[in-house]
Amino acid sequence: MNYENSARSFKSLLILIFYFSFILILNYLVSAHIFVIIFLVLIVLPLAFDIGRNKKSGIKISNKEIIWFSGNFKGQIYLSDISCVEFKKRLDLSYRIRLVDQNNNKTLLPAEALPRVNTLEQTLKLYGIRVVNKKFN
């Protein structure tokens, strides 16, 4: 399985355009206070920088290993070294996915490098890797 994600996607551009349109509407039609406008612009700056840099991320699962990357961060682990994969569902309904090796060392996978949880879980089961679901921990 190969999965690659780019920060410069159609969805990201639409969010950025609608968000700045919302800020302009607040500024000119509602006459919002300047500190509110500055606060809203500061919130969206990381998304704007990610779109500008076009940070790529992804994961590759083969018969021998799992390779992941996110920007300059890269990692790999052989399938024979993996004890299990933990899927922890958090209170905000996002998932934190960790690879647990034979020595009980845990490696957190970057969220932006992962496909949908269902797809990843089915792929890992297909390769014979034990998946552990932990809800709200």
Image (cartoon, helix red, strand yellow):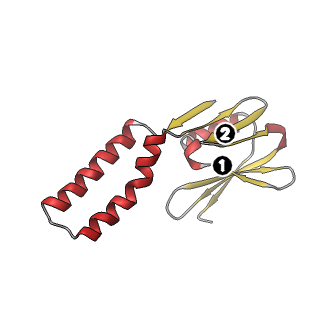
In the rendered image, residue 72, in percent from the top left (x then y), is placed at 63, 42
Numbered label tally: 2
Check contact, mark 2 vs mark 1: CB within 8 A: yes
Q: Residues within 10 Å of mark 1 (few under 14, many from 20)?
A: some
Q: Is residue 90 visible?
A: yes
Residue at the (83%, 56%) spot, across then down? 104
Location of residue 34 with respect to 88 vertically, above or below: below
Q: Amino acid at mark 2?
A: Trp
Q: Quadrant of the N terminus?
A: top right
Residue at the (60%, 43%) spot, across then down? 70
Q: Circle 1 is placed at which residue position?
A: 109
Instruction: Name the disc covering residue 65, or none.
Output: none
Q: Residues within 10 Å of mark 2 (few under 14, many from 20)?
A: many
Q: Nearer the viewer, residue 115 or 30?
A: 30
Instruction: Name the disc covering residue 68, or none.
Output: 2
Residue at the (75%, 37%) spot, across then down? 128
Q: Earlier in the sequence, mark 2 or mark 1?
A: 2
Location of residue 28 with respect to 118 vertically, above or below: below
In the rendered image, residue 12, in percent from the top left (x then y), is placed at 39, 43
Q: Residue furthest left?
A: 29
Q: Nearer the viewer, residue 39 or 116?
A: 39
Q: Nearer the viewer, residue 23 or 137?
A: 23
Q: Quadrant of the C terminus?
A: bottom right
Is 74 displayed left or right of 55 in the figure? right
Q: Amino acid at mark 1?
A: Leu
Q: Is residue 117 visible?
A: no
